[in-house]
Image (cartoon, rainbow, N blue to C red):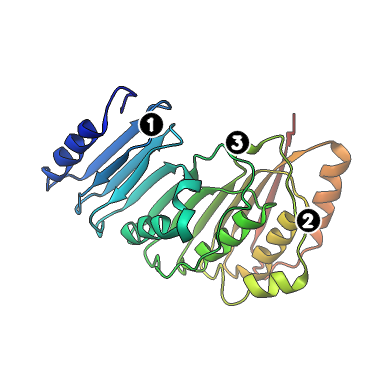
Amino acid sequence: MLKPHLNSAQFDALAALITGCPRLRRLGITVDPNVLGVTLKIAAPHLRHLFIKTRSIHLMVEFQSLLPDLARAQLRLPFFLYVQEGGSKLLHILQSISQVEKLEFFDRNPLVDFQAMVPFKIQTKFENLQYLTTDADLGDAAHFVFIFEFLRCCPNLRGLKIKFPVSRHGFHHHFEETQEFWNAHGYGDLFRCLRIMELIDVYLPYNELQFIKLVLSKAQVLENFTIVHRAENESSSLEACIEILKFKRVSQGAQIKYNVASAH
């Protein structure tokens, strides 16, 4: 647990301690919300389990070695800091953890305006990644494009869970794209290995419904699709449910579990 009174020299000492443990297999770090702008440098090439939960919107993490043995990682980071300057810092993070098998990737972002985010290409492939949990506002264009870009790098993904960000509840910033958008981002064999899909706390505007439609049309081995809808009222939940039932399922065995949660 990193407390706010720690200064940069003490963070460097912690980094040296981690580096000095060459057989380190498990590392868990929780950062106090009042920790100011510092960078924690991590060199631990034999990590199997990595958990970083920062409640600070200022902390940066920098991996100084690849993590080829990583089985599971849970990262809760201030996403908006990493996508600045063309997203090079985020790309470095992704490259360092690219051998991970199970990834939970959450955005510690207090902002509700993502217009400053710069789209970028992810060159790294996550060949070993089997299960991904993340939070994303699928009604926000920048979040949406990033999710598509990331999923295209995960050819063997078997389980995908997307949660609507808690920090954005009550804020509706939804866009509606054309068919050209879906053709540009939904092409190829996306979801070819996907068996389990979960969408949690979604509001089901147009784009979230289109995302569901795309998954059902692409995931040939899909078995279970769970949707938790934060419906404004009973009428909106009924309309969404009827719309979802119209979507064609390329997997004949796909089962849809639709639940309603209060939007308030």
**Cα distance in 3D space between marks 2 and 3:** 20 Å
Q: Which residue is mark 3?
A: 166
Q: Which residue is mark 2?
A: 206
Q: Nearer the viewer, mark 2 or mark 1?
A: 1
User: Relative to residue 78, is residue 122 depicted above or below?
Assistant: below
* Residue type (three-letter) at the residue carrying disc 1: Leu
Nearest the eye: 33 or 170:
33
Judge left or right: residue 97 versus residue 192.
left
Nearest the eye: 166 or 238:
166
Mark 3 neighbour class, 10 Å CA radius: few under 14, some 14 to 19, many 20 or more: some
Q: Secondary structure at mark 1?
A: loop
The first of marks 2 and 1 along the sequence is 1
Q: Secondary structure at mark 3?
A: helix
The first of marks 2 and 3 along the sequence is 3
Q: How many marks?
A: 3
**Cα distance in 3D space between marks 2 and 1:** 39 Å
Nearest the eye: 100 or 14:
14
